[in-house]
Image: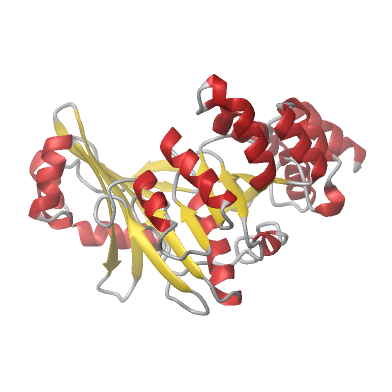
Amino acid sequence: MADLQALLGDVIRRNASDLHLSVSIPPAFRVDGELCYAQKHAALAASDMEGILNELLNAEQREVFRHKREYDFSFTFRGTGGETARFRGNFFHESGNVALALRLIPTAVRTIDQLELPPILRDVAKKKRGLFLVTGPTGHGKSTTLAAIVREINATRHDHIVTIEDPVEYLFTSEQCVVHQREVGSDTHSFAEALKRALREDPDVIMIGEMRDLETVSAAITAAETGHLVLATLHTQDAAQSIDRIVDVFPPHQQGQIRVQLATILVGICSQQLIPRSGGGRAVATELLLANPAVRNCVKEGKTNQIKTLIQTGGEIGMHTMEQCLAGLVNRGALSMEMAMSYAYDPKDLQRILFEHR
């Protein structure tokens, strides 16, 4: 029988981001972005996975899993050695067997400075209204960045924060703000429904775990237009793609109006990647767009191909491209040239910047 408690403790001790459990192979950890099997651990049997399913889900949750064939959830783990952490999980079926992917969510919500994020994100946390997006691939810290911004708001403002998540990841304690966290599935039926209801709950800040569909995007835009600060994530690579993705969700006859609305409400877009450091661990690399009059005009007119140029020339107000950030990490010795080049959106531009700084 697999000892789930011991495996979860190993995730924390190894500072792994993920744990993968499935039949016929040993448990696998993701450390610094790389998957590796647990040493000296036998392959898991179907009975092991059934036992883990029964340990983590109650009877009602198991019934939903049997019916839908997959299930998202989260839980707090307390180890025998006193270690504590949150995990986000997804049970699914593969080749007729139960499998599980777990993501470690550190219990402590780290600050913007601790995460080495752009300090100007503290200014975003002061905004009273508008839409701010954090974008990037799955597993590259979008939820962690949003949590850091919410932490900043919670510590510095006297407002009502409503989060809508699937599932709830970081747990917040109400400090200066009142924080209510709603989980899709247990507290509400959907992101879109919770967003509509949130406008009747006297919120100042609304954090959306993910904008997945037309209804959710539309409700988020409405919330930002009606005087709320809306924080959300998208699985897009950069600022230009993020703007296009939001617009493209809508039918063609609505897209012109959506561009006008988006140009009015946009606060900014932080796109990010987590990249293996030269000495171990991972560094966060970001692209940051902040909405000034030139950016708003580009959004309104659908000229997203000009966005990167505006970011390149917007350094005086805190904007930077992914390549500018990567060059800084290389120059500080945090990343190797080869690693930075492999993560650059535009390797030739990164080469140019590094050559100019020599």
Compared across the picture, whether 76 is left or right of 4 comes to right
Q: Position of residue 191 (x, y in %)?
A: 37, 46
Q: Is residue 275 above or below residue 173?
A: above
Relative height, residue 97 to residue 190 (above, below): above
Residue 318 in percent (x, y) is at 79, 53
- Please report the residue visible at 58 percent of the width from the left and 47 percent of the height from the top: 133
Residue 121 position, x and y percent, is 67, 59
Quarter of the image where the C terminus is located: top right
Q: Quadrant of residue 115?
A: bottom right
Q: Is residue 291 above or below residue 254?
A: below
Looking at the image, is 35 positioned above or below residue 56?
above
Furthest toward the bottom, the residue is: 176
Q: Residue at 70%, 43% (x, y): give it.
A: 336
Residue 138 appears in view: no
* Identity of the residue drawn at 58% across and 62% down: 149
Taking the spot 26% from the left edge, 48% from the top edge, the residue there is 40
In the rendered structure, the answer to whether residue 183 lies left or right of residue 35 reads left
